[in-house]
Image (cartoon, rainbow, N blue to C red):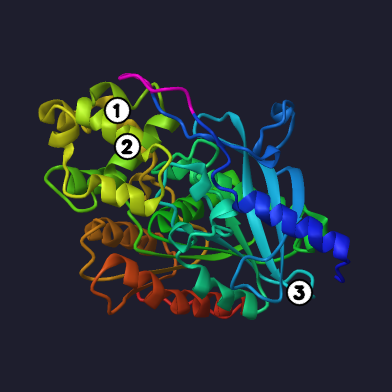
Amino acid sequence: MRLTAGSMTRRIGTAIIIASTAALTAAAPATADTIVYPATLHDAFFSTPADIADRQPGDVLAARAVPPPLGFPGTDAVQLKFRSTNSHGEPISAVTTVLSPRGAAPDRPLLSYQAIINALGLECAPSTALYAANPLRGIREAPGLILAIQRGWSLAIPDHLGPNSAYGAAKVGAQITLDGIRAVQRHSPLQLAGSPVGLAGYSGGGMTTAMAAVLAPTYAPELDLVGSAYGGAPMDIGEMAKGLGESAHPAFGLAMAAALGLEREYPDRMPITAQLNEPGQALRDRIANACTNEILASGAGLSIADVADPEVGMSLLESPSVREVLIENSVEQVPAVPNAPVYEWHSPTDVLIPLDSITTTLRRYCDAGVPVLSELVPSPDHITAAVIGLPGALDFFDGRFAGVEPPSNC
């Protein structure tokens, strides 16, 4: 598409709007028992239309062309707002950013990539973070994702934490992911209606990807999913919470953020805020709109005992309502299995996620006849494994999009 000076100016203006992450409406001052929701972005594109209940999951509510993010040359980009469903079956709006090779063929492969979003702030979501001026607030996997574009695929990157930035809520993230694919395929200018589809992600994005793969057969059975690939995925969020919260841990901030994110999604079943002591309330307020680095720094070296009465804090994980929420959002606990092949990777020395939950989940898939290829990558830590494993995931999809027999080491 040839750009005129006027259209280029409009596109640059759109980029400036997207990148202005400081343009937020502050939430009301929090009290001790207040659930703190994220500040609202000053961008009407993210608003929810009044008639959303009349729309179907995956219906496109709005679309806008945006410039390609830095590092994605030769790429066309569009953002779609679409109708999805929260964990309670209620309508919500969500956004996905679609990147395509310029001049790409119709019905090319489509990869929905669920990025790492360890965040409680809306400005940390991919639709904004892809354009962040501060690289520390950008998408960590972005340099590797250009490889998918170079293979001629389109890439959909959903804001899978949803309008409340409900970090830790894998069910709503999975539904947003699947509805985002529906929206992409219904948006006719993209010419992706007949495309084969893959799901991929790492860490929290891997958890969402794994959940989307098991929900797809019932939630979006019409989608032509050829496979899912995920790495470093917390398959049981309850076990991960125990591992990060029982004693002082450098990544306790992630556990705290997940608890607050789940409370946002399940305010009547996750009474987290009411249990916080004064330091816990202060930590809540510090990270209420924070991205990964701020969350990690704010919670480093803490434990549940530092933010709540230790007896109440640990027993809360075993309360019936909280257990129900944790089970609902833990892939290991969901009895369904994917209806397409799986590629999984992780570091054998990853201390951030419960590795036994990965083994148990994949064994169940194998027993159900799902082709699973699980690989250990030579990485000493959680984050490095993301980079090392991504090329293998892309190669996995080369075979799936080509219709080759899926590999398995079940």
Q: Quadrant of residue 104?
A: bottom right
- List x then y, in percent, for residue 313: 18, 30
Q: Quadrant of residue 357?
A: bottom left
- Which residue position holds label 2? 259
Mark 2 Cα shell of 10 Å, populated few (<14), some (14-19), many (≥20): many
Q: Earlier in the sequence, mark 2 or mark 1?
A: 2
Q: Earlier in the sequence, mark 1 or mark 3?
A: 3
Please name the residue shown 27% across and 79% down the image: 378
The circle on residue 272 is 1
- Inter-mark Cα distance, 2 to 1: 7 Å
Q: Quadrant of residue 46?
A: top right
* Relative side of 131 to 286, left or right: right
Mark 1 Cα shell of 10 Å, populated few (<14), some (14-19), many (≥20): many
Residue range of the region highlighted in magenta in the rendering: 27-34
Question: Is residue 29 magenta-colored?
Answer: yes
Vertical relation: 36 (above or below) 350:
above
The circle on residue 192 is none
Asked if labels 1 and 2 touch by Cβ distance under 8 angstroms, the answer is yes
Q: Amino acid at mark 2?
A: Ala
Q: Amino acid at mark 3?
A: Arg
Viewer can see residue 223 = no
Q: Amino acid at mark 1?
A: Ile
Secondary structure under tag 2 reads helix
The main secondary structure of the magenta stretch is: loop
Q: Quadrant of the N terminus?
A: bottom right
- Which residue position holds label 3? 102
Please name the residue shown 66% across and 40% down the image: 43
- List x then y, in percent, for residue 137: 46, 56
Q: Quadrant of the C terminus?
A: bottom left
